[in-house]
Image (cartoon, helix red, strand yellow):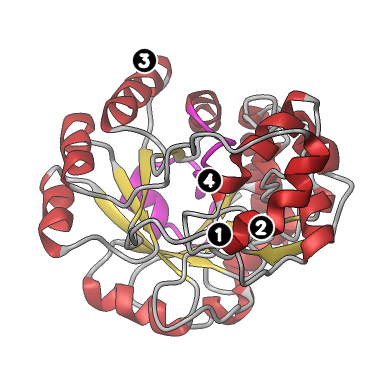
């Protein structure tokens, strides 16, 4: 075989295959990153819910197990003051009553990239740092670049792609509306745009396709539409190395009904339906803004998960969720690469 038709990503990152294991807070960590890297992909650690010390420790654990390019992923949202969530808690009160739980201290919030996290990046010196919800302030971004890390930005619209290009990122993660998890929009408002439409946008830097990609045919289609690499999340959720819960795993490969919802964090994210979504709708104006909605849900989620239920949990997944199958992450990475290359060679 002659190899990948677009080699810019491989040459830029040093990865063996043009696949990024998506950073998925709560569902991915050291074990999944290590396995994906052993398969030749870029491994990712989701850092938005970690402390700086945890970032340093987890990166060291990855480095102790394998070599290859490592991506640290951070959020760049603006953290608003804690809002009044009286209406949200009132809406949830019937569920508190049914579950027999009371309010509890909220879990740690997803925090935006700050000076303390910049220090962690300086300590780790990762090959790649990727950002969701735009980019950090110029002084923080300069500190990331100073360690020699590549900077990847996430875009959900053509305007965001051009904005990131003007900002000088090294590659753009093109997040189509098919993608699971939080839509990383940061300009104007959320405009769901299919991946194929975004891949046709002309920008100078490599495009990394994300959204609904779970098999070799999806990867080949993305390359044929202008991608230099793909970022895969949902397919890795079914791997034994992922931290996905049992009720979450039970739906993968079966459920196909994914929706955008604001119930679990206040931000729009695509996931599988569960009891809470069915009861109050996927979008509800009572939910506080991102990331504050999760606080009031915490005791409900803890009670249900302790009983093996995902009734109040964010079951993030992309539109390809019904097509995934359990497979060790290293083997999955190698298989997807080989099968994709075969399809591209035929084409």
Residue 173 vertical placement versus 166 (above, below): above
CB of mark 4 within 8 Å of CB of mark 3? no
From this viewpoint, is residue 317 visible?
A: no
Tag in front: 4 or 1: 1
Tag in front: 4 or 3: 4
N-terminal-most mark, 3 or 1: 3
Q: Position of residue 245 (x, y in %)?
A: 71, 31
Q: Is 324 covered by the magenta stretch?
A: no
Residue bounds of the magenta highlight: 2-29
Label 2 to label 4, Cα distance in Å? Answer: 14 Å
CB of mark 2 within 8 Å of CB of mark 4? no
N-terminal-most mark, 4 or 3: 3
Q: Give the structural element (helix, strand or loop) at label 1.
A: helix
Disc 2 target residue: 90
CB of mark 2 within 8 Å of CB of mark 1? yes
Q: Give the structural element (helix, strand or loop) at label 2.
A: helix
Q: Is residue 64 left or right of residue 121?
A: right
Within 10 Å of the Cα at label 4, are there few (<14), some (14-19), or many (20+) other Cα atoms? many
């Amino acid at each position: 075989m002659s190899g990948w038709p677009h080699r810019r990503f491989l040459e830029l990152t040093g990865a063996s295959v043009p696949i990024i294991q998506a950073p998925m807070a709560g569902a991915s960590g050291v074990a999944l990153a290590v396995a994906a890297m052993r398969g030749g992909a870029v491994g990712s650690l989701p850092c938005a819910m970690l402390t700086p010390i945890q970032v340093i420790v987890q990166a060291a654990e990855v480095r102790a197990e394998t070599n290859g390019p490592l991506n640290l992923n951070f959020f760049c949202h603006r953290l608003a003051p804690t809002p009044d969530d009286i209406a949200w808690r009132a809406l949830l009160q019937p569920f508190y009553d049914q579950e027999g739980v009371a309010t509890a201290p909220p879990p740690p919030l997803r925090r935006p990239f700050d000076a303390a996290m910049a220090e962690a990046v300086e300590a780790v010196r990762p090959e790649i740092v990727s950002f969701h919800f735009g980019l950090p302030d110029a002084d923080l971004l300069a500190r990331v670049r100073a360690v020699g890390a590549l900077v990847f930005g996430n875009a959900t619209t053509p305007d965001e792609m051009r904005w990131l290009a003007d900002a000088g990122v090294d590659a753009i993660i093109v997040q189509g509306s098919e993608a699971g998890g939080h839509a990383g929009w940061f300009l104007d408002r959320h405009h769901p745009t299919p991946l194929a439409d975004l891949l046709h946008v002309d920008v100078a830097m490599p495009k990394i396709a994300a959204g609904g990609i779970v098999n070799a045919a999806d990867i080949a289609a993305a390359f044929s539409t202008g991608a230099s690499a793909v970022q895969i999340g949902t397919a890795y959720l079914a791997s034994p190395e992922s931290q996905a819960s049992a009720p979450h795993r039970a739906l993968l490969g079966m459920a196909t009904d994914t929706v955008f919802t604001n119930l679990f964090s206040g931000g729009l994210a695509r996931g599988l339906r569960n009891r809470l979504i069915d009861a109050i709708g996927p979008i509800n104006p009572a939910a506080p803004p991102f990331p504050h909605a999760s606080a009031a849900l915490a005791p409900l989620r803890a009670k249900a998960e302790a009983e093996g239920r995902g009734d109040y949990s964010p079951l993030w997944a992309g539109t390809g969720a019904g097509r995934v199958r359990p497979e060790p992450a290293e083997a999955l990475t190698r298989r997807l690469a080989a099968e994709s290359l075969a399809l591209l060679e035929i084409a």
